[in-house]
Amino acid sequence: MAEATSTKRATYHHGDLRQALIQAGLDLAREGGPDAVSVREATRRVGVAPNAAYRHFRDRDALLAAVCSAAQAEVARAIDAQLATVSPDQDPATRARLRFQAVGLGYMRFAQRHPGLFRTAFWTSRDLAGARSPERRGSGGRTPFELLSSALDELVETGLLAPGRRHGAEFLAWSAVHGLATLLIDGPLRGLGEAEVSRLEDRLVMMVEQGL
């Protein structure tokens, strides 16, 4: 995709061009994080003039915000895939515990596999206003934040988390897994081997679940 675009311009329907630009932005983010996302490069990759992008995005920040949401949807899909590994045959309490841990593992493993997208996913999120946005939903129909909230609710329903400790638990759990994920891809832990990383991730999600 990095080769020079032909002088022949591509033709898109209105909505298709918007999606093509977001996908090009995702590809750029995957390669180089949020700083790599630009209107000029996205339009070059889809084969349209830069001015065409401004019918859909007022500026580069607007494109990056859309890419941020699309990257969060990718995170949600990774969490959905991890949740799918939990057997439905477990007793309710064990299943709730494993599903809660799966949310954290899916999140951190996504960061390991796609650091550029992970760095981009929350780049433009200044608050929780978009935490339940349809653009951030994965294959299961929920955003990363909603998946975490649902897993915590399951802990309460099965008696593993006291109702009085439920308030704000999303922020504590999220902070822990995001912190380790960031240390592993951008901090002093990025030199650890795969086996050690896996052990740390497993211990962290168990620690968070027990600490709540």
Image (tube, helix red, strand yellow):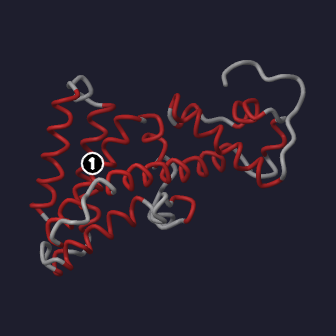
Residue found at x 53% / y 37%: 34
**Quadrant of the rendered image containing residue 147:** bottom left
Within 10 Å of disc 1 (Cα), the crowding (few <14, some 14-19, many 20+) is many
> Is residue 172 or residue 25 the one in the foreground?
25
Q: Position of residue 58 (x, y in %)?
A: 74, 51
| Left or right of residue 11: residue 124 | left
Residue found at x 54% / y 35%: 29
Q: Position of residue 110 (x, y in %)?
A: 37, 42
| Left or right of residue 65: residue 147 | left
> Is residue 73 or residue 191 the one in the foreground?
73
Vertical order, 163 against 29 (above or below): below
User: Helix, strand or loop at disc 1?
Assistant: helix
Q: Position of residue 156 (x, y in %)?
A: 19, 77
Residue found at x 48% / y 39%: 117
Q: Position of residue 39 (x, y in %)?
A: 71, 37
Q: Amino acid at mark 1?
A: Leu
Q: Quadrant for the N terminus, please.
A: top right
Residue receiving disc 1: 105
